[in-house]
């Protein structure tokens, strides 16, 4: 905290607090700066503002410049406005001035983000789901692609695998298409997502994908099939988020190829996020993944941007191996570690309840870290 700031502790209606978090992430601002701007606007308004119902409030704290804080308190007392009410009005003013943007379709096409690591259980699915939800909160249209035949992402949202005899992403990839893939999309409900979050569910035919691709006679189809299959879906979305399987086979090659930097696309617009754990076996797994990405880039003359590592399930109490491993991830240089996610109960609860994390626990630290990763990815 900078020296010239005072801690503000208040009670805020939960909905206002949640909106503040979402809009601050969307505007790429810190909460402190958003509240500071709100207080400045409140002081400049010079007229009574609509009263805000603060009945169902929870505690909230932030830091604002000391001089501004003092002047604001004095204003509240002169105008005989309860301080909590004044601050709620100030935050509402900032929200009014910073609405969710209406997003026009990106001229470079949908941004494509894969969460990949062949190591199992590191949080690929949890991150794909959480970051996808956070992007939808920010006003982006998001398609979550369950590209893992295990179907964990699909199940997390309370859905079943697609029937094996029907249409699927894999059938589309292998030229056995029966209908437009868009017909398979399922909307994921959530007040803060509106109608912006969709899931392309998994089908168990995914277990056959590598075998089917290897026998394909079409040149280059082994790596490009996912891109071809998702073409029609891409047109409808700002972000396509791919939850990769824990393997290094052709499925992964397809995902890597899919998130490459396309011609004319700005560097870092699309790419791969690599969830890892702070332990030695995660480092070995990364070496293999890196080799796969590098050799694909060499073979196909493409560029795949690493959007960053997320060190997941972090628990410093586990001692030196864990803390030194985190240091090792951090020392890898740009883009480096974009988030450290603790082992938190809300993630497991959300999976158990088959409810999106940001619906189940929108005010949790776990939800906030997903918003933070989404902000980094969307930059
Ligand atoms: N930060 C976290 N805190 C608590 N539990 C977590 C966290 N991240 C993931 N989990 C839980 O750990 C388990 C493994 O996570 P997840 O399924 O996301 O990993 P994965 O890399 O997708 O696994 P797989 O390789 O099998 O696809 C899940 O039960 C998930 O809910
Ligand atoms: Mg998974």
Image (tube, rainbow, N blue to C red):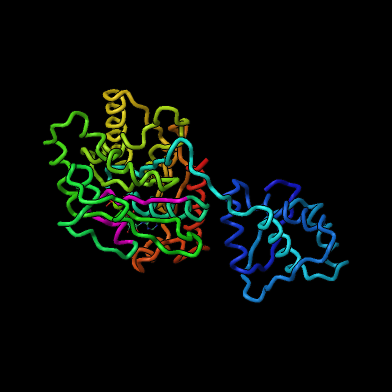
Q: How many marks?
A: 0
Q: Is residue 20 visible?
A: yes
Residue reaching furthest right? 78
The residue located at (53%, 47%) in the rendering is 103
x and y, in percent, of residue 244 in the image: 30, 46
x and y, in percent, of residue 70 in the image: 82, 57
Q: Is residue 206 above or below residue 330?
A: below
The residue located at (38%, 60%) in the rendering is 187
Residue reaching furthest bottom? 55
Taking the image as shown, residue 29 lies to the left or right of residue 149, namely right
258 or 105, which lies in front?
105
x and y, in percent, of residue 337 in the image: 46, 40
Q: Is residue 300 above or below residue 152?
A: above
Q: Which residues are magenta?
A: 141-156
The residue located at (61%, 70%) in the rendering is 58
x and y, in percent, of residue 97 in the image: 69, 54
Taking the magenta stretch, the answer to whether it contains residue 143 is yes
338 or 211, which lies in front?
211
Ligand 1's quadrant is bottom left
User: To which quarter of the image does residue 326 belong?
Assistant: top left
176 or 282, which lies in front?
176
224 or 297, which lies in front?
224
Taking the image as shown, residue 327 lies to the left or right of residue 59, namely left
Q: Is residue 316 visible?
A: no
Taking the image as shown, residue 143 lies to the left or right of residue 194, namely left
Taking the image as shown, residue 8 lies to the left or right of residue 22, namely right
The residue located at (51%, 61%) in the rendering is 192
Taking the magenta stretch, the answer to whether it contains residue 165 is no
Residue reaching furthest front? 179
User: To which quarter of the image does residue 220 belong?
Assistant: top left
């Amino acid at each position: 905290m900078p020296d010239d700031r005072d801690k503000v502790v208040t009670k805020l209606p939960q909905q206002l607090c949640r909106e503040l978090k979402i809009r601050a992430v969307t505007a790429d601002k810190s909460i402190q700066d958003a509240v500071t701007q709100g207080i400045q606007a409140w002081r400049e308004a010079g007229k009574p503002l609509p009263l805000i119902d603060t009945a169902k409030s929870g505690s909230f704290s932030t830091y604002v410049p000391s001089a501004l804080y003092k002047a604001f308190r004095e204003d509240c007392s002169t105008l005989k406005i309860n301080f909590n009410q004044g601050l709620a009005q100030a935050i509402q003013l900032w929200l009014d001035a910073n609405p969710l943007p209406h997003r026009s379709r990106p001229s470079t096409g949908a941004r494509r983000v894969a969460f990949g690591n062949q190591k199992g259980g590191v949080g690929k699915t949890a991150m794909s789901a959480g970051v996808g939800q956070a992007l939808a909160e920010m006003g982006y249209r998001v398609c979550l692609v369950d590209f893992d035949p295990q179907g964990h992402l699909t199940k997390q949202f309370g859905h079943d695998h697609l029937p094996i005899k029907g249409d699927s992403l894999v059938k589309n990839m292998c030229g056995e298409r029966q209908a437009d893939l868009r017909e398979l999309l399922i909307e994921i409900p959530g007040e803060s997502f509106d109608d912006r979050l969709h899931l392309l569910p998994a089908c168990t035919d995914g277990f056959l994908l590598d075998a089917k691709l290897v026998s394909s006679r079409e040149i280059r189809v082994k790596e490009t099939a996912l891109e071809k299959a998702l073409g029609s879906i891409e047109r409808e979305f700002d972000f396509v988020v791919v939850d990769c399987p824990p393997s290094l086979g052709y499925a992964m090659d397809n995902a890597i190829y899919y998130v490459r930097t396309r011609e004319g696309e700005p560097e870092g617009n699309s790419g791969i996020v690599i969830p890892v754990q702070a332990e030695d076996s995660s480092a070995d797994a990364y070496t293999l993944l890196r080799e796969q990405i590098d050799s694909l880039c060499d073979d196909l003359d493409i560029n795949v941007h690493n959007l960053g590592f997320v060190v997941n399930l972090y628990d410093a109490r586990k001692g030196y191996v864990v803390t030194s491993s985190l240091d090792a991830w951090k020392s890898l240089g740009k883009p480096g570690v974009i988030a450290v996610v603790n082992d938190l109960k809300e993630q497991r609860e959300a999976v158990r309840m088959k409810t999106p994390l940001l619906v189940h626990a929108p005010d949790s630290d776990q939800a906030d870290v997903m918003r933070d990763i989404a902000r980094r990815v969307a930059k």
